[in-house]
Image (spheres, grey):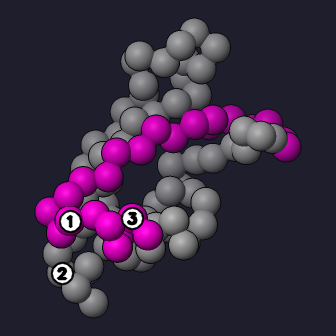
Amino acid sequence: MRRAWAGKILEVLKPDGELITLIFPISDHEGGPPYKVSVADYEEVLHPPGFKAVYLSDNDLAIAPRKGREKLARWKRSISQSSL
């Protein structure tokens, strides 16, 4: 994850817009691609520009090999945070 990605999202998303992410692969494997990620990785780059997760859930529609390794998240910007 890169802070530049979060900055670009902040730039292109309307003030009342929402960001939907599919967090995958959530695992302990080494190497890649795909490289492992976690919810904390997303929070690390999305919280500083003011995004907060308003929804986080396992992806019930994941294909069998990915079950339990994907999460869906919906993020909204806090107006007070994003105007700093």
Q: Position of residue 10 (x, y in %)?
A: 35, 70
Q: Earlier in the sequence, mark 1 or mark 2?
A: 1
Q: Dots 3 and 2: beta carbons under 8 Å? A: no
All told, the count of numbered labels is 3
Q: Which residue is mark 1?
A: 14
Q: Nearer the viewer, residue 25 or 40?
A: 25
Q: Dots 1 and 2: beta carbons under 8 Å? A: no
Classify mark 3: residues with Cα within 10 Å, few (<14), some (14-19) or many (20+): some
Compared to 59, does 71 lie above or below?
Answer: below
In the rendering, which numbered label is found on residue 36?
none
Q: Which residue is mark 3?
A: 9
- Horizontally, residue 36 falls left or right of residue 63, namely right
Q: Which residues, given as a range, are shown in magenta?
A: 8-31
Q: Position of residue 19 (x, y in %)?
A: 32, 52
- Residue drawn at 25 percent across, 80 percent down: 81
Residue 44 in sight: no
Of all residues, the one furthest to the bottom in this rendering is 84
Q: CA distance from mark 3 to mark 1?
A: 9 Å
> Which of the 4 image quarters holds residue 72?
top left
Q: Position of residue 49 (x, y in %)?
A: 37, 76
Q: Earlier in the sequence, mark 3 or mark 1?
A: 3
Give the structural element (helix, strand or loop) at label 3: helix
- Horizontally, residue 49 falls left or right of residue 2, namely left
Compared to 28, does 52 lie above or below?
Answer: below
Give the structural element (helix, strand or loop) at label 2: helix
Compared to 14, does 27 lie above or below?
Answer: above
> Which of the 4 image quarters holds residue 8?
bottom left
Compared to 9, does 70 lie above or below?
Answer: above
Q: Which residue is mark 2?
A: 80
